[in-house]
Image (cartoon, helix red, strand yellow):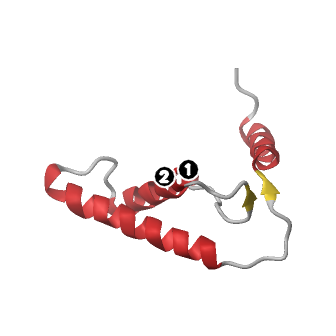
Amino acid sequence: MCRNIRTLFNFEPPATELEIRDASLQFVRKLSGFNLPSRANEAAFERAVEQVAASARELIGSLITTAQPRDRETEAARARARSAARFGRTA
């Protein structure tokens, strides 16, 4: 589940709100053990996602680096190459 959380800092273009929320959702799913919470837990689950997203936005906004921003397409190609080397090519 958490393997779907991607690095969001130092990319050009910067991470979108949707990417931050998706990563936050995955994180809360992992912590809670719920893929989809019950109605009784839905409010707490959504509140946690929003709080994690707010913390993630604050973190990403406050980090400093002298490294050049990474290109999303280049990083995606590297990830595909690592996956192919690890698991073999799939059709």
Residue projecting furthest to the top: 91
In the picture of the structure, the residue carrying the numbered disc 2 is 22
In the picture of the structure, the residue carrying the numbered disc 1 is 4
Real-space CA distance between mark 2 and mark 1, rounded to the nearest whole angstrom: 9 Å
Depth check, mark 2 against mark 1: the one in front is: 2
User: Would residue 18 appear left or right of 9 to someone viewing this image?
Assistant: left
Classify 65 as above or below 82.
Answer: below
Classify 54 as above or below 17.
Answer: below
Give the tally of numbered discs: 2
Disc 2: CA contacts within 10 A as few (<14), some (14-19) or many (>=20)? some
Q: Secondary structure at mark 1?
A: helix
Classify 89 as above or below 40.
Answer: above
- Name the residue: 19% across, 50% down: 38
- Name the residue: 61% across, 73% down: 61
Q: Position of residue 52 (x, y in %)?
A: 43, 68
- Name the residue: 73% across, 42% down: 83
Q: Position of residue 30 (x, y in %)?
A: 41, 59
The tag earlier along the polypeptide, 2 or 1, is: 1
Question: Within the image, what quadrant is residue 84 found in?
Answer: top right
User: Would residue 9 appear left or right of 46 to someone viewing this image?
Assistant: right
For residue 75, the mark is none
Question: Within the image, what quadrant is residue 51 found in?
Answer: bottom left
- Name the residue: 68% across, 58% down: 14
Asked whether the beta carbons under mark 2 and mark 1 sit within 8 Å of each other, the answer is: yes
User: Would residue 4 appear left or right of 42 to someone viewing this image?
Assistant: right
